Amino acid sequence: MLKYSFYLSFLVFIFGLIFRMVQWVRYDLDANSARQSKLRRLIAIGESFWNHLISAQALIMFKAFVWEGLFQASIARSSKLRWLAHMSIFWGFILLLLFHALDDYISARIFSDYASTLNPFLLLRNLLGAFVLFGIVIALYRRRRQFVIKRISNKGDLSALWLIAGIIITGFLLEAVQIISENQFDLMVNDYMMADDDSEIAALRTYWAKYYSVSFAQPLEMTDENLSMGESLHMDSCASCHSQPHFAFVSHNLSQFLKPVATILNTLNADSILLVIHYMLCFIGLAWLPFGKMFHIISTPLHYCVNASTLEQSRNSTAQANRNIVALDACTHCGVCSQNCAVEPINRVIENSCILPSEKIKAVRTMAAGAHPVILEDLFQGNSVCTSCNRCTQNCPSGIPLLDIWQTAKKELHDRGLYRSEETIIHHTAYEWADLWKSQEPFKKAEQSFQLFISDDPETYEECVQCSVCTQVCPIVSASSTGGKPLDLTPQQVMNLLRIGLTDKALGTQMVWMCATCYMCQEHCPQHIPVADIFYELRNKAHQQLIAKKTGDI
Amino acid sequence: MQLTYSYFPGCKLSGGHLPEYARATQTIMNALNVSLIDLPFNCCGYPIRHQNIEASVFSAARNIAMAENAHLDIMTPCKCCFGNLKHSQHMLEKDSQLMSIINDRLQEEGLCYTGNLEIKHLLTVLYQDIGLDEIKKQITKPLTADHKIAASYGCHALRPANVTNFDHPFDPVIFEKLIETTGAETVFWSKRTECCGHPVLEKNQSLSKALLSSKIQDAIQADATMICTACTYCQIQYDEMGKEIRPEIPTMTISQLFAKTMGKY
């Protein structure tokens, strides 16, 4: 069964890899990429591979692979603790994979006297397992405790950690159960003992019970005679393949806890059950790798290499189209970008996860795959909050050019007909907007957190005498009238609408939206009406109306 | 005693826009024996204010709370950052309900806002805290009087004056006085306190251009040979659009002007 499970998971793994790699060619980040023929993009991959292989670039890329991929220098730059955790998990797991999981093909061929139960392999295996668990503990702590990281961590991140932890823990448990297992002892005796004499086996049992921690159901005669006979038998038949189990420092200590229930474990065949679980977890990991976040084992080092190559930076649009998607795949969802994002706090008030770079990049990827307009709307709104402070790019351990991606996405979404509220608003007149909003289902008013939403309070405008000073000092009014395209209403007229209670009709006026927020009106107003502050509030309100309905509805 | 501030460069400067302004500000502060401390600040909240005032106030409050935590006043070279931080401080002072909402959010990460600190613009720090005399001492390569400089104030620091407390909202003086320490002359121009046009750039490019153009014309009519700014957004606007309109009149930030006359360039 294990064999077929392996074949199945390996098959899924291979198909998954092909599936993901085909996406590098299939997906388009922008219209520019979409114009390239898919065949040419496929050829471009081969072409660029070949070009690099035969040039000195191969060396530069190799250096990037070693430095960034194997030693993870970028992670070290962003956080020493995260580097320690990631290196422990990565190297611990990779070495276990090579020398333990694939021991028949690697360890046995390199070391002529290899046996999994011999030192140093026995000790090293435990050491590596302990490293991985150490890394997992730090990573889990980070995902659970660090404020921003906790907010962005999802099931995918946590299950990846738990899966790796599960593989290691079942490995330790399996080894612990095997150490104390009478079944295992009997099996080995059957396979490797020359003699068949019961007294000899009894002697060996006493020796193994004393020095190798095996737990036997029947009481043993612990005499010196038995032990010395056991020792010589052990030397003949067992010693060449077995170091003392104490060297497996994790499993051995674990086995001491299990000793009281050793008989039960034996009757339950716990060792074979654990073996199946251990293997199955590995197979699940293998099959899942191309589809989950663990795909970064392949995509991120590849992206490091692509980034390092100066050949790749030549602006060949076909290669660029492929490179964009590889960059999107290189995200490990580590969250460092969101931790450093200047507008992250804004996301705590406006609940659009696409404000955060670590979530936005996923949305951009779905956009590249041809996503539903509703996702695009969220992406567009979230992306428009970005202030281009570039800290995401500067801090990304995978070296993804995030700001470039945001700007490409912004342009692409604009080309697909998504507009910011400032641009949408001029598509209709203020009165048309008022009617549109009236026809909408009653807009669920967001819980008001302000006492100071002054525009709702009629007293705010009570003092307005329509003297028009606000209009006369407004630079926008004067610039637009000398420019030949006067605005629909002046500040004083907007104030009048509000004064007579026609707030709906004021929300969509060009005056409100073209306001430069220079506060000339407010500062000059002889009646102390906070004109500019009111305009801010009106834009806030109109904004809520506009984003309450997704594109296409209005 | 050495003056110390937490330095709030704003997203544009920290994102690599106007690298000369960023570098020169650090240089002159260094020369004037002012220590600038970097804190992990976020966005000042100015860009999001049109869309969601609460998000804007929270964003500003988080920065202020961090500076409070470090027992430092804030100094920023951007007038829009300055204006929004001040505005949020003002709102929180007046609205206790808003303050408790904001503090509930801040508490999640162990921060607390009381608002008990000063937010200062670069010009205020230079004029009030350091003083003209100290600056004059550092000017080693003064300009000649044939340099006629037009000071472009930047509206978000000036108004609303009861909130920003920067200078007179229509007849400010500190920028000119600072420029005059370099030996250059300043000119009086009527549009010096008006909007540069950057806030409407993304909404309406021609309107934005018209605003800037009328300012530049006004400065030229007043015989200015150069325009000086003290705001990231104003400088970006003059840099990007001014060159199209009247390329003959250069624009420089106050930090660069001082760095140059202090012989640091």
Image (cartoon, rainbow, N blue to C red):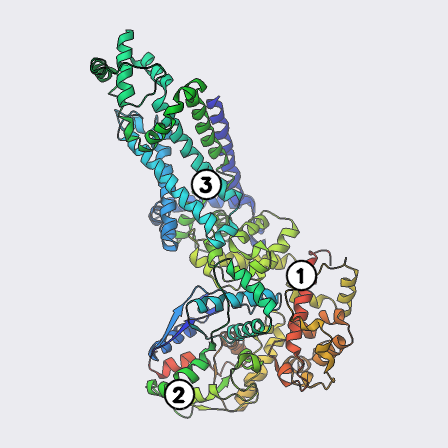
Q: Earlier in the sequence, mark 3 or mark 1?
A: 3
The chain letter under disc 3 is: A
Q: What is the number of the mark on residue B188?
A: none
> How many other residues sit within 10 Å of disc 2, few (<14), some (14-19) or many (≥20)?
some
Residue situated in front as seen by the camera: A245 or A59? A245
Can the viewer see residue A309 in this picture? no
The chain letter under disc 2 is: B
Determine the residue located farthest toward the bottom in the rendered image.
B145
Q: Secondary structure at mark 1?
A: loop
Distance, label 1 to label 2, CA atoms, is 50 Å
Three-letter code for the amino acid on which mark 1 is drawn: Glu
Q: What is the number of the mark on residue A161?
A: 3
Residue underneath mark 1: A447
Please give left or right for residue A108 compared with residue B94 in the image: left
Three-letter code for the amino acid on which mark 2 is drawn: Leu
Three-letter code for the amino acid on which mark 3 is drawn: Leu
Is the C-beta separation of discs 3 and 2 under 8 Å?
no
Residue underneath mark 2: B132
In the rendered image, residue A425, in percent from the top left (x then y), is placed at 69, 66
Q: Residue at x 37, y 42 (%)?
A: A134
Image quadrant where residue A446 sits: bottom right
Can the viewer see residue A94 in this picture? yes
Callout in the foreground (3, 1):
1
Distance, label 3 to label 1, CA atoms, is 38 Å
Q: Secondary structure at mark 3?
A: helix
